[in-house]
Image: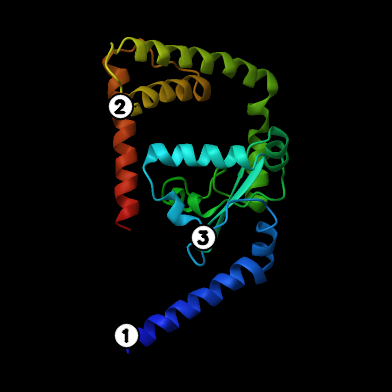
């Protein structure tokens, strides 16, 4: 009995896999994009079950091999990686295809349907309000701030001594927060002593609280 049930489930998965990959319009279009061959049902998922270091090497090797665009299949979900700047510009400058992927759903409990997660008419209206904020002259000023904060992070890493730093999270989170505060709010956290540390800890607590609520919702 169990064998029959397993065979039926396998058959259902194979039929579903064929429909998603080869019969549906989305699957047929995705398959026009070059990419590594995968296995039935799981696609390329098993190729990704390696250490983080090997995952990075695997992705870089594939994107180099199939440059400038490559596709992966993870079960019934496709993933497309784009590297050429012209392709990225075409996608990011589009005002039509702006619906966010499934990964943005985890942000809804925290951000709601704001500019980052919204779509359609709501996205257009809010983007129009914020357009003056992203004027080219303003963004040029931000480049200098981001450059300086990157230099500060490099100095922090050098000051860590001759030991190998395995956990970069404290470094990049501190300097990322500094960059956000200075660009978005016009206030630098640098030189504020204990207040800077307290503010950073408060942000981390909010992130952990959000993660806990999402995992237990």
> In which image quadrant can residue 158 be found?
top left
Q: Is residue 45 left or right of residue 92?
A: left
Tag 2: Cα neighbours inside 10 Å, few (<14), some, or many (≥20)?
few
Callouts 2 and 3 close, C-beta under 8 Å: no
- Label 3 SS: loop
User: Which mark, by number, is residue 2?
Assistant: 1
Quadrant in the picture for the N terminus: bottom left
Q: Which residue is mark 2?
A: 166
Q: How far across and down, in percent of the image, does residue 170 sit?
A: 32, 25
Q: Is residue 131 left or right of residue 47?
A: right
User: Which mark, by number, is residue 43?
Assistant: 3
The tally of labels here is 3
Q: Nearer the viewer, residue 147 or 25?
A: 25
Q: Nearer the viewer, residue 56 or 191?
A: 56
Label 1 vs 3, first from the N-terminus: 1
> In which image quadrant can residue 163 be found?
top left
Q: Nearer the viewer, residue 163 or 157?
A: 163
- Label 1 SS: helix
The nearer-to-camera label among 2 and 1 is 1
């Amino acid at each position: 009995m169990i064998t029959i049930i397993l065979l039926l489930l396998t058959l259902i998965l194979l039929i579903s896999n064929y429909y998603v990959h080869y019969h549906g319009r989305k699957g047929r279009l995705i398959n026009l994009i070059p990419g590594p061959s995968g296995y039935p049902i799981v696609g390329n998922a098993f190729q990704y079950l390696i250490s983080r270091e090997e995952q990075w090497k695997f992705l870089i090797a594939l994107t180099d091999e199939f440059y400038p665009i490559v596709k992966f299949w993870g079960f019934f979900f496709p993933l497309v990686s784009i590297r050429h700047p012209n392709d990225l510009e075409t996608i990011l400058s589009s005002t039509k295809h702006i619906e966010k992927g499934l990964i943005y759903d985890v942000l809804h409990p925290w951000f709601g349907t704001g500019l980052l997660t919204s779509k359609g008419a709501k996205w257009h209206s809010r983007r129009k309000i914020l357009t003056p904020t992203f004027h080219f002259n303003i963004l040029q000023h931000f480049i200098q701030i981001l450059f300086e904060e990157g230099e500060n992070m490099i100095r922090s890493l050098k000051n860590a001594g001759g030991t190998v730093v395995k956990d970069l999270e404290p470094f990049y989170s501190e300097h990322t927060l500094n960059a956000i505060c200075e660009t978005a709010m016009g206030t630098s956290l640098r030189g504020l002593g204990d207040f800077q540390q307290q503010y950073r800890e408060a942000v981390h607590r909010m992130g952990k609280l959000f993660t806990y609520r999402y995992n237990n919702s």
